[in-house]
Image (cartoon, helix red, strand yellow):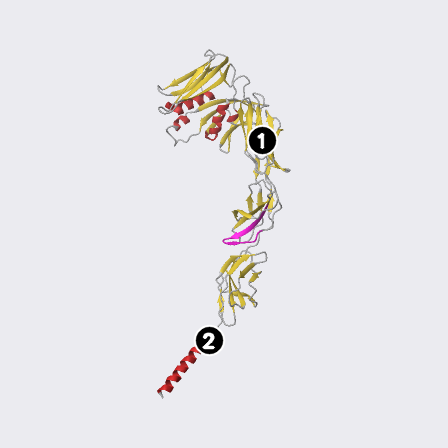
Amino acid sequence: MKRIISITITTIIILTLLSAGSAVSAKVSVAAPSIKVANTKKGVRISWKKPKGAKRYIVYRKASGAKKYSVIKKISKAKTVAFTDKKAKTGKKYIYAVKSVNSKASALSAKKSIVRLTAPKSVKYIKAKTTKTSSYTAYEPSKLKWSKVTGAKKYNIYRSEFNGKKWGAYKKIDSVKANSSGEWYYMRSGKYTKFKVSAVSGKSESVLSAATPKYLELDSTSVRVKRFDDGLVIDWDFIGGAQKYLLYRSENEGGFKLLKTLKGEDNIIYSDEAVKKGNYYSYYVIGVKDKVKSEKSDVDVRSSAYYDDCDYAIELGENENDFLSSVYSLLDNLQGSYNKITYKSSDTNVLKVNVTTDGKNTKTVKLEGVSAGYATLTVKSTMDFGDGFDAETTTTKYKIRVQDSPVYMVKMKVGSKRSLTSMAVPSDMNELIELSDNSLKMTSSDESVVKVKTKDQIPYFQGLSAGEATITVKMDIPDSFSGEFDLLKDFSADIKVLVEA
């Protein structure tokens, strides 16, 4: 009897286990989809790869701030793994989820959020322009402009460039914050270019806008003029993409004429030897590619070797604040005990050099015109740092003219503008002026004749009416600077300016 009961219990246990195993194998599992959301032209696209065991899908959506999800699509085919929500409103944030389903089970994806954004419309490329009025000149650089996209927090700028054979892929080059109407100022590349723009909010981005037509615009450049021997050397920054440069020149504030065409992007220096001593010359440069021209460069004005018979001129008597004396007074003091500077006149009956000292160091250097005529000033500078170093000596000679009439270091016409580099001083003095341009402060003795102004922190002066005035030049050193800077604060030079009608 016990044996029969034992066999029966064992049979029941086995049947129960078989039944349980049969139930497990009959259950069909399903994996949750991994979804992606992206803006398209037609709406928000939700996509995923077919998960294991899925037979159909349910797409859910919830607007940001809503309490419940809504079913926006039921997909009956397992192979359909994308859906575009065409009813999503621009500027609104939505949260999506997709449930994969089979006959016995289901699994819900992770939630993904996105802001519905459309591509910017009316993207236009606006070329740079210069507006001139009687009172001012305004320059507005090239820019892209487009219509505002609702919900956008910023815009991404994409660019494609033509390399001579084919157009490159669009690459993001910049982002700008959204405002009432989008715009972005373009740094010209010198290549044929097209642009596209997208709207962005957080991690959400629209598709790219339609491309602008192709454009080519060359950047402008900055021109510099220096004296060299008996001529003037003009150089400028190269313009990317330029095939040639057009160099224009004006003499004594007359009209500009084409001086030279220089071929090649890197051909950026020219020596103008056809200049007359004592004349003023103005230059500007235009870059050219195909038939497209850059904006004119800024204009640089420089006198040629100002005097036809000397390097520098002074008036009779002791010249208290003439430029050359003031510069050497400053240099002599700054260089201190390491450097010894000596001054010698070839004819003391015409020119004397009066040097005052404090017993150790030079305090002032003053040129004195004794009588009308010419003399050579020799300046010898010896730098000696002591044992272990070889002393270095530099000798500079200036032919000085002493005259019994006023010396105008700048001559200009009414309305014209001058910087200190246009003064009638030796070329080595011009280089010192260029190095300290933005550290100089100028005042005019008569602002009805000559007005001092500033551009890009660099002072210049403008002739307002016929007459003469004295420009006093000083170093613009903050009061908080002390020590060796006190010497710079003491620098002062007077420049006589003649303004002609």
Q: Quadrant of residue 131?
A: top right
Residue 264's place in the image compared with 173, above or below, is: above
Q: Is disc 2 placed on a helix, strand or loop? A: helix
Label drawn at residue 305: none
Instruction: Categorize mark 1 by other alpha carbons within 10 Å: few (<14), some (14-19), many (20+).
Output: many
Q: Quick one: 170 or 454, which is closer to the camera? A: 170
Quick one: which residue is furthest to the right in this view?
291
Q: Relative to residue 438, is residue 126 depicted above or below?
A: below
Q: Amino acid at mark 1?
A: Tyr
Q: Is residue 414 visible?
A: no
Q: Mark 2 or mark 1, which is nearer the start of the sequence? A: 2
Q: Position of residue 12 (x, y in %)?
A: 41, 82
Look at the image and tell me in which quarter the N terminus lies. Answer: bottom left
**Would you place residue 198 above or below residue 50 in this image?**
above
Pick whichever, 341 or 42, lies toward us: 341
Q: Which residue is mark 2?
A: 23
In magenta, the rendered stretch is 194-208
Q: Return the residue found at the far top.
A: 349
Q: Callout 1: helix, strand or loop?
A: strand
Please tell me how crowded label 2 is: few (under 14), some (14-19), or many (20+) other residues with Cα within 10 Å: few
- Prevailing secondary structure of the magenta residues: strand
Residue 244 lies left or right of residue 364; in this view the side is right
Judge by depth and name the residue closer to the eye, 436 or 475: 436
Q: Nearer the viewer, mark 1 or mark 2?
A: 2
Displayed quadrant of residue 138: top right
Quarter of the figure with the C terminus? top right
